[in-house]
Amino acid sequence: MRTAGDSQVLARNVLHNPRVPVLAAPPIPAAPPTTLSAGHTGFAHGTALLQGWLPPTVEAVAAIALGLAIARITKRWWLIQLPVCLLVGVGAALLARWYVHDQGLSSDPAPTALWLCVAAVATASAVTVVGWPRTPWWRRGVALLAIPLTLLSAALVVNQWVGYYPTVQAALNAFTAGPLPHETDEAGLATLRGTDIETGRVVPVQIPEDDSHFAHRTEYVYLPPAWFTGPTPPALPVVMMIGGEFNTPADWLRSGQIMPTVDKFTAEHAGQAPIMVFVDASGSFNNDTECVNGPRGNAADHLTEDVPKYVESTFGASTDPAKWAAVGWSMGGTCAVDLAVTHPELLHTFVDIAGDLGPSTGDHEHTVARLFGGDERRWAEFDPSTVMAAHGPYTQVAGLFDDLTPPRAAAQPPRGPHPPPVEVADADAGIGGRDAVPDTGEVGAAETLCARGRSVGIDCAIHTTEGEHTWQFAAESFTSSLPWLTERLGLAAPPTR
């Protein structure tokens, strides 16, 4: 049985809504900026994929190739064959849009450019097949070339939409399974024991799934410099790091690129930082479990049973729930809140970055069907508001919400593939309501959950930041919350001089 320990309530509401009371405690760092500065550590190195010359250049070349493949002079081509190819493209785009909506793959709208790219891929494929007979070799080659170019354009649009890979180098490292920052194998840790290392180490681990039977990918554990001091590991705090809906366990390191922030923090705090566990909450890239137990796998059991048991026994981590926290982005933010309210015996602290009101893959009916096999009772076991009301008073639990408000069209014109924000009621937007509708108001999931949490003894604070739903926002939010998080976990080491 895990023992409960004392912990202070450490939070302050920054850019708060007046309806959410301010907490009297050590200050939380100022809310993240609305946009990244050009020199932001981790995102300014290498050929950019989120802006700059490369994405529009690839899209322009793809359009030219497709245009050359289509431009033919026969009457039959223009009257019969080309219309058939265009119908194939339109049908593919509509089918893709229906699938994304039907599966609840995103609570934010996909950019229109994505459906145009899907249509272009299907059209290029149809043009290649239909137009192959009696076609010059060079035109066949152009038609074939248009297929991968349009596919690449679609991938670039998706990447810009979610901010997944900031640079070409980050994408190549991910696709080639290149080493993560400070990565080492578990066998090499013993040689570092008792040494004074400047930066921590990231270790790939295979966590047993004996309790959950949840098939998962390789996960990662970050061990700060303080873990290596002394003859045995100190019982350090632990933070579970949870990514978004489309994810790999390494996303916080590759796409979020948070390691420079962590290194800077440990350098200024005598090597002190929590152990961070980069968990797999999905099992595969597009398996949206929302960290619950259900038809898509027992993700909740993996995070609450497998992971703590392994980290505590393997790395000597603290077993005190006051020393455990969850930090999540997007779907992971929803997971962080859910873990804290359903398992206060495991962790007392959470940071929710742009999460939803609760586990969601669309509206309530679709969510219950997809995540819980239609069982309303199972849904109630994982709905944070329902769980909080049933649990009664919480003690020593606190959290930080970093709520995202999309840029207003008048203040910031849409860039690239992003459509202008649509004004809708908060009840319908981005908090488990309609699919493909953005949450454009400051009053949303964060305020609702914070208010309900405070009514049952959970201390909370809200940052409200205007920005876009990307990994860069997640990284900025993590950076701003790290000092509060570490102090809350008992690692308020004074900065070195």
Image (cartoon, rainbow, N blue to C red):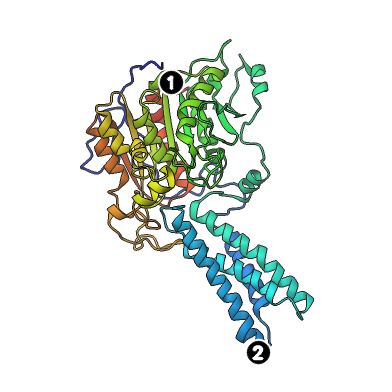
- What secondary structure is marked by label 2? helix
- Gap in angstroms between the C-alphas marked 2 and 1: 78 Å
Above or below, comparing residue 347 to residue 450 in the picture: above
Image location (x, y in percent) of residue 307: 51, 27
Q: Is 243 placed left or right of 82 in the picture?
A: left
The residue nearer to you, when weighing 459 against 73, is 73
Confirm whether residue 275 shows in the render.
no
Residue type beneath disc 2: Lys
The residue at 39%/56% (across/down) is: 435
In the picture of the structure, the residue carrying the numbered disc 1 is: 493
In the image as oriented, which residue stretches furthest toward the right? 137
Residue 75 disc label: 2
Is residue 80 left or right of 350 when viewed as pictured?
Answer: right
- Of callouts 2 and 1, which one flags the residue occurring earlier in the amino acid sequence? 2
Which residue is pictured at 53% across the width and 49% down the height? 164
CB under 8 Å between discs 2 and 1: no
